[in-house]
Amino acid sequence: MFHTLMTIGYLVPNVYLFLRIKSLFIGKEYRLVYTIVYLLVALIYPATIILAGEEVGSVASVIEVISGYLLPFYLYVFMLVLFLDIFLLINFALKIFPVGVIRSSPYRKFCLPGIMLLSLIIVIAGIINFNTIRTSEYSITVPAKSSGLKNLKIAFVADFHLNGRIPLSFVGKFANKIHEINPDLMIYGGDMVEGDRGDGNLESFARILTGISPKYGVFGVLGNHEYYYGGDKGNFFSMAGITLLNDTVDIIDGAFSLAGRKDSHFRGRKSLPQILSLSPDSLPLILVDHRPTEIDFVSKTKTDVQLSGHTHDGQLFPVSLITKSVYRLSWGFRKIGNTHFFVTSGIRLWGPPVRTAGKSEIMIINIAFI
C-alpha cells in the first residue's frame, strides 16, 4: 500500500511536468524524441518497485540507486516548473514582461536548462549534507532527587537504517566521532537496521560499533523499521553490544533510570504508566521512545528527559513543512512542563540518499543534576 501511494504520488506530478515542459519548451519537431526520453527516465522509479525482490548486485540494485537520486531531482524540477507557471499566471494578469519575450527562442533556450541545473545543484548539495555528520549540543538541568550524580553527557542518534548500501567507512567515521565526543552514555533511538535484502554488512557494522563503550554503557530501542523486518533481525543489537530496552527500565549505577519503549507497531507494547511504574520516584528518569507522538502525555508524567527520532526532520524540503505540522516537535529541543524533549533528525535516512532539510546528526546532551 505504501509503495502504491508513493507511485501514485510520483506519477501524477510527472504527468503535469511532462505536459508543461512539452508545452513551454519543446518545439514540435522534437516532441517525439522528448516523449520517448522522458518516459524512459520517468519509469525508472516504478521499475524499482517491480524489481524490488531481485538480488543485490543485479540490474535492480543499479536501477534502485539511480531512482534514489531521481526522486528528489524530479521533486525540485516539478517545484520550479510550478513556480514558473505561477509567475506566468501573474504576468498574464499584471503584464510585468511582454508576452513576446517569454515566448522567444532565447527564453526557451535558457529557461529549461536553468531549471535542470538549479535542481541538480540542490540535489548535489543535499547529497553532501546527507553524508556530512554534524553534532548538535545542548545543556540542561534536571532535579537530582536522591541521585549523587552531578553531570551526564549523552550521545544520542537514531535512524541509522543500516543495510548493504551503507559504506563501512561512514559507520567508521561515526564511531570516530563518538570517540571524540567521549560520552558517558550512548543511546540509539530506533531504526538501527533496515534488515532487507542488502544486509550483508551487518556483522561488519556490529564489529565497528562494539568499539563504542562509554562509562554507563550503550542502550537502544526498536523502531518501526525493525518491526517491518522482524524485530532484532540477526541479533544485531547483541552483536553490536547494544542493550535493548523493550518496555523496560534499567537503573544505571544507582544514579538514574533509563526507560525504553518498543515502537508502537509492536503488538503488546506496554502503556507508558506501566513502564514508568518500574522506575523509582527517587531517581531522575530518561525515556527513549522512537516516535515523538505522545509529547503532551509524557510532559504530565515524572519523565525528566525524552529522546526520540523517526521524523528525519522531513528529509526533503518542502516535506519538512508537513512534519513540522504533524509533530509538536519534529526536530530539536523543547521543554514542556518539567520534561526536556529531544528529537533528532537522524544519522542516516530511509529512501533517497539526499537531505535538503535537517542534517545527519549526533545529539550531545549535557545534563547537570541539581
Image: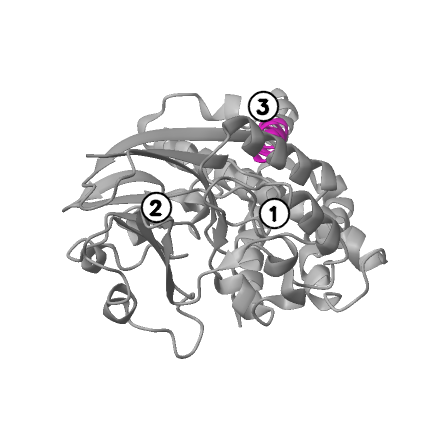
Please name the amino acid that badge 3 sits on. Tyr
Query: x, y (%) of residue 75?
Result: 54, 44
Q: Is residue 38 visible?
A: no
> Do tag 3 and tag 2 residues touch (Cβ < 8 Å)?
no
Q: Which residue is mark 2?
A: 330
User: Mark 1 packing: few (<14 Cα in 10 Å), some, or many (20+)?
Assistant: some
User: Mark 3 packing: few (<14 Cα in 10 Å), some, or many (20+)?
Assistant: some
- Magenta residues span 117-130
Q: Secondary structure at mark 2?
A: loop
Image mark for residue 352: 1
As rendered, which of 186 and 348 lies closer to the eye? 186
Report how far apart the C-alphas of labels 3 and 2 lie in the structure.
41 Å
Please name the amino acid that badge 2 sits on. Ser
Query: x, y (%) of residue 130?
Result: 58, 35
Q: Which residue is mark 3?
A: 107
Query: x, y (%) of residue 255?
Result: 31, 46
Report how far apart the C-alphas of labels 2 and 1 lie in the structure.
19 Å
Disc with the residue nearer the chain's start (1 vs 3): 3
Please name the amino acid that badge 1 sits on. Pro
Disc with the residue nearer the chain's start (3 vs 2): 3
